Amino acid sequence: MLDLSKYQSIGAALKDALDQFAAETCLIESDREREKERLTYRDFQERAHPLAKALQDKGFQAGDRAAIIMTNQSKWLISAYVVFFCGGVLVPLDYKLTPDEQWQLLKHSSSSVLITEYPIWRQLATSGGRSSATSLTTILVTEAPPNADLAGARRWEEFRGSGAPIFVPRARKDTATIVYSSGTGGRPKGCVMTHENYLEQCVALTSLYPFTPGMRYLSILPTNHAIDFMVGFFGPFICGAAVVHLRTLRPEYVRDAFAKYKITYVSLVPLVLKNLQKGLQARFDALSPGKRKVFNALVAINKALTKNRPHLALSRRLLKQVHDAFGGELRAIIVGGAFSEPQTLQFFYDLGIPVANGYGLTETVVAVTVNDLKPFRADTVGKPLPGMEVRIVNADQEGIGEVSVRSKTVMSGYLNDPELTAEAIVNGWFMTGDLGRFDPSGHLQLFGRKKNMIVTEEGKNIYPEDIESVFESLPVKEFCVFAANYVWPQRSMVGEQLVLVFHLEPGQTFSGELRADISARNSRLLNYKRIHGIVVFEEDFPRTASLKIKRNVLAERLAQLDRAAAVLPL
Amino acid sequence: MRTVEQTTQEILDLASKYFKVPAGSLAPDDDFFKKLGIDSLQTLELLSLIENHFGIELPDYEVQGVSDFRTLASRIQSRL
C-alpha cells in the first residue's frame, strides 16, 4: 500500500499506484458469463493518458468540473482518474436519477464536462432540462452504436490526444469532488469534498480492512456512491488490488461472480444483504433433517470459536459449502448506505462471514465508525475510526443525543449554500442529525433521526421536500410530506417511511377519487421515493408571515395524534 | 413475430405465475412494484425470467425508471 501521508491529492496517489503496480491486474469487467475485459495497471494508464491529453487540449484545467453518469464499469474509473490527473473536480452523479434531475445537478455543479454512457445520453439528450446546463462544453459518450445520433456529444473511445498529458498537482485542501447527498427537488446538497478528506478516510479504513495485490473487490454499489468510490476504486488502487465490475446485476450473475473471481470484499446495501440472507435461509431450510442437524451443530461450533474475533480459516473449514458458494476467499461483506438490522448481521457472522457495518454520511466521505470485529457487535455501528472525534450533543437522561463529528474527513461545505453549511458545521463539528449514544465499551448505537428525512434500505437518502412537487395542484387546501419517524420518533433506523399530510377544503370529503389521484401521482415517483401513508389533518397548517409552512410546528401538532390511527395506508 | 399486445400478455402471465398472484389480476398499466409487492431486486429476477422466456438479453439500463408492464413490454418488443 502507498504511504498516503506523503501525498497531496487523489490524482498524485493514483498516478504512483499505476506505476508501482503496473503488472498487477486492476480491473476485470464481466457481462453475464462473458469476461469483457481484464486490465493491468499499465493497461489502465495507457487507456487514460490519451483521454487526459485530449481533455487538456480542449482546455480542461485545474479546478474545472467534470461529471460522470455511468453504471459501474472500467470506463468510469478511467474517466475519474483522468479528471484527477488533470487537476479537475469530479462530480459523480447517480445514474438512477431521472434525466431532469441529472440536468438540474449538472447545472448546479457548473460542470463543463460530462462523461456518460450512450443509453443514458439517449435519454438525457431528449430531456427538456438540457438547455439549462449552459456551462457544459464537452460531452463524451461511451459505447455508442456505429450509426448512433450523438446529439452533439463525442465518442469517448475516439476522444484521444497524441503526446503525453501533463500531470496537474493539487493541494490537500483543494476540492476533489462534489458529491450530491440528495436534494434534487429544491435545494441540491452538493457536498464539497477535499483531497484530504479522501486521503485521510482511506488511511483510516484500510487500517481495519486492508487490500493487497491479488485481492479482488466486487463492485456492486453504484460507483457514484461514496462507499464504492472509496472501497471499489481509490482504496484497492492505492494497494494494487483488483476491482471486478459486472455489467448486469441479476442475482444469478452476482452469485456466480463470487466463485468465478474469488472475491475478497464486496459492499452491499442492507436490502441486498437481507435478500442474500433470505436465499441462504431457504437453502438451509430445505436440508434434510439429518443434514440440518449436522449443519446447525457446525454453526454452533463456529459461533463459539468466533465469539471474540473472526477465525476465517477455521470458519471456511467448518462451513466449507457456505464459504465455497462465496468463492472461498471472502474476508468480509462491507454493508453501508443505510442501517442494517442486527439479526441480519449476526446471521452472516454466525456463518463465519464477517459483516463490516459502520456509520457514515456523504458529508464525512464514507465512514465515521466501523465494527472492528473484536468482538463483533451486531447491535452497534462500531467504534470511531482512527482520526474521528465523535461526541453526543444535548444528550437526554438515557445518554441519547445528536451525533456530531470532527475529523479531517468532514466536507468543507455544501456547494453554493453557506446558510446550510453553517447549520451543518458548528464550530468545526459536523452535526449529523442522527441520534445515538455510546455504550460502555465505546461502540456507537443509533436511535433514529432528528432530521426530517429517511434513508431507504437501498441506501437512498430521501428528503420530503424533494418529492413534494409531484403532489403540486393536488385538489386539497394544503399538503406537506414528512418522514413518519420524524413526527413520531421510533428510536429505530429501519422501516422508515414517508407520509403525505393534507388538509381538505371546507366542506370537502376524502373521496375515493382523491385517494386514486394521490396514488397515481405517487406512482410517478421512482419506487424508492414513494410515500407509504396519508394523514388527513383537520386544521389549517401553521405558516410564516411569508406563508411558508412551518414544518416544525406542524410536526409538533401531528405528533399529538396517535400514529397508528392517524396514518392511513396508501 | 409477436405483437406488442401478445408480448405484454406473456409478461403478465410470467409475472403472475412467478410471484403467485391470481392469473388475470394484472393489467398492462399496473405498477408492478405495487401490484406484485416487489422491490428493485425482485424486478431483476423478473427480468431474468423475461430474458429466458423470450430468448433475449435485456441490459439493466433498459428498464431503468420503468414501473409498468406496458412500458416494459415495449422495451422488450424492440429487442425481439
Image (tube, grey):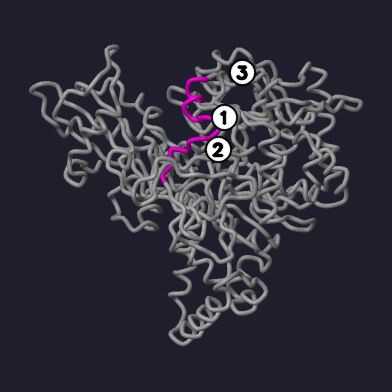
Q: Position of residue B54 (x, y in %)?
A: 51, 50
Mark positioned earlier in the residue sequence (1 or 3): 3
Mark in front: 3 vs 2: 2
Q: Give the chain letter at badge 2.
A: A
Q: Give the chain letter at badge 1.
A: A
In the displayed structure image, the side of residue A526 where residue A87 appears, left or right:
right
* Residue under numbered circle 2: A362
Give neighbour class at mark 1: few <14, some 14-19, many 20+ (Cα, 10 Å).
many
Judge whether residue A425 is colored magenta: yes
Q: Give the chain letter at badge 3.
A: A
Count the numbered circles shown.
3
* Residue under numbered circle 3: A110
Q: Position of residue A235 (x, y in %)?
A: 71, 47
Q: Nearer the viewer, residue A532 or A15?
A: A15
Judge whether residue A82 is colored magenta: no
Up the image or down, A481 lies above or below A284; here it is above
Gap between marks 2 and 1 measured at Cα: 7 Å
Q: Position of residue A220 (x, y in %)?
A: 60, 49
Q: Could you confirm whether marks 2 and 1 are on the same chain?
A: yes
The stretch in magenta equals: A418-435
* Residue under numbered circle 1: A191
Q: Residue at x 76, y 26 (%)?
A: A87
Q: Are marks 2 and 1 in contact (CB under 8 Å)?
A: yes
